[in-house]
């Protein structure tokens, strides 16, 4: 588990150095009765993702398990899958690859590593859609991010995802110029991203997302200065949070 988390940390700290990165976010709802086998299925796909990263097809890949208590005990997904890309060109090239291409690619990635019977099993389960009852997909462009060192990896990594609707033209500036600065010292990771595309079944009202990893013991405090009170008041009025998920990192490449 530590190796996975170290990989993830190296990933997020490296992308934070880029002026802009792109990522896709898949909200997965599982078919009933498949929970026990699902993570092993994704681990099988993880071998192909590791190969894709080494060959420059994408920048990173991670899977997060959703806490059932999220969104006031009403989460809209069981797992979140994130595919990270270092540029829009890299993302467009990866997303243009067909399902048949990926089926060949995953078999090649496992060649000499995995029994043929196991490969056939998981390829068939992929084609049959055994695990996923639904997948809602979002294509994201990062706008701003913040990273700080010091995360204790022994207890794993937990994060929060917020789906946000922009209510006025000042929203992004409030996040970038005020809230980002206020988060310094309180979060190991924070990023604001804009949704630039989504699947037909994806939730329509949200326009942006925030993904963050809080420092231990962090509790938001009410501002004391008048100027801060006004910034928070009008900043919160510029957005609407439609839902939130508490996430636990399961695996990453």
Image (cartoon, rainbow, N blue to C red):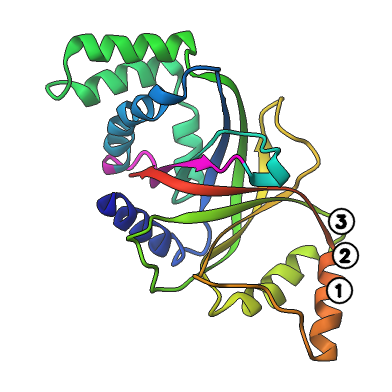
Give the vertical position of 5 relative to 181 (above or below).
above
Sequence-first disc among 1 and 3 = 3
Q: Are marks 1 and 2 in contact (CB under 8 Å)?
A: yes
- Please give the label number shown on residue 167: 3
| Residue 221 visible | yes
Q: Are marks 3 and 2 in contact (CB under 8 Å)?
A: yes
| Residue 170 visible | no
Secondary structure under badge 3? loop
In this figure, which residue is indicated by the disc labeled 2?
A: 237
- Is residue 215 one of those drawn in magenta? no
174 or 104, which is in the foreground? 174
18 or 60, which is in the foreground? 60
- Looking at the image, residue 54 sits to the left or right of residue 206; the answer is left
Task: State the image coordinates of residue 82 (x, y, percent, origin top left).
Answer: 49, 42
The magenta region covers 54-68
**Residue at x-position 39% and y-position 30%:** 39
The part of the image, by quadrant, that contains residue 104 is top left
Secondary structure under badge 1? helix
**Residue at x-position 49% and y-position 13%:** 129
CA distance separating discs 1 and 3: 14 Å
- Please give the label number shown on residue 73: none
In this figure, which residue is indicated by the disc labeled 1?
A: 233
- Is residue 67 one of those drawn in magenta? yes
């Amino acid at each position: 588990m530590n190796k996975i988390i170290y990989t993830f940390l190296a990933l997020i700290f490296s992308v934070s150095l880029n002026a802009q990165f792109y990522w896709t976010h898949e909200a997965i709802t599982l078919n009933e009765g498949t929970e026990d086998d699902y993570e092993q299925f994704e681990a099988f796909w993880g071998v192909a993702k590791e190969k894709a990263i080494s060959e420059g097809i994408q920048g990173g890949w991670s899977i997060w398990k959703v806490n059932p208590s999220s969104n006031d005990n009403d989460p809209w997904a069981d797992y979140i899958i994130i595919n990270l890309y270092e540029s829009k060109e890299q993302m467009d090239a990866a997303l243009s690859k067909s399902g048949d291409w990926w089926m060949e690619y995953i078999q090649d990635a496992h060649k000499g590593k995995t029994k043929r019977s196991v490969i056939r099993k998981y390829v068939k389960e992929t084609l049959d859609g055994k695990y996923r009852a639904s997948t809602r997909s979002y294509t994201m462009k990062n706008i701003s991010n913040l990273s700080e060192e010091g995360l204790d990896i022994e207890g794993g990594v937990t994060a929060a995802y917020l789906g946000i609707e922009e209510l006025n033209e000042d929203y992004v500036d409030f996040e970038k110029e005020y809230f980002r600065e206020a988060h310094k010292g309180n979060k190991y990771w924070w990023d604001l991203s804009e949704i630039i595309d989504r699947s037909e079944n994806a939730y329509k009202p949200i326009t942006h997302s925030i993904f963050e990893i809080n420092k231990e013991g962090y509790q938001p405090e009410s501002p004391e200065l008048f100027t801060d009170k006004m910034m928070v008041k009008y900043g919160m009025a510029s957005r609407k949070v439609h839902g939130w998920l508490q996430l636990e990192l399961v695996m990453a490449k």
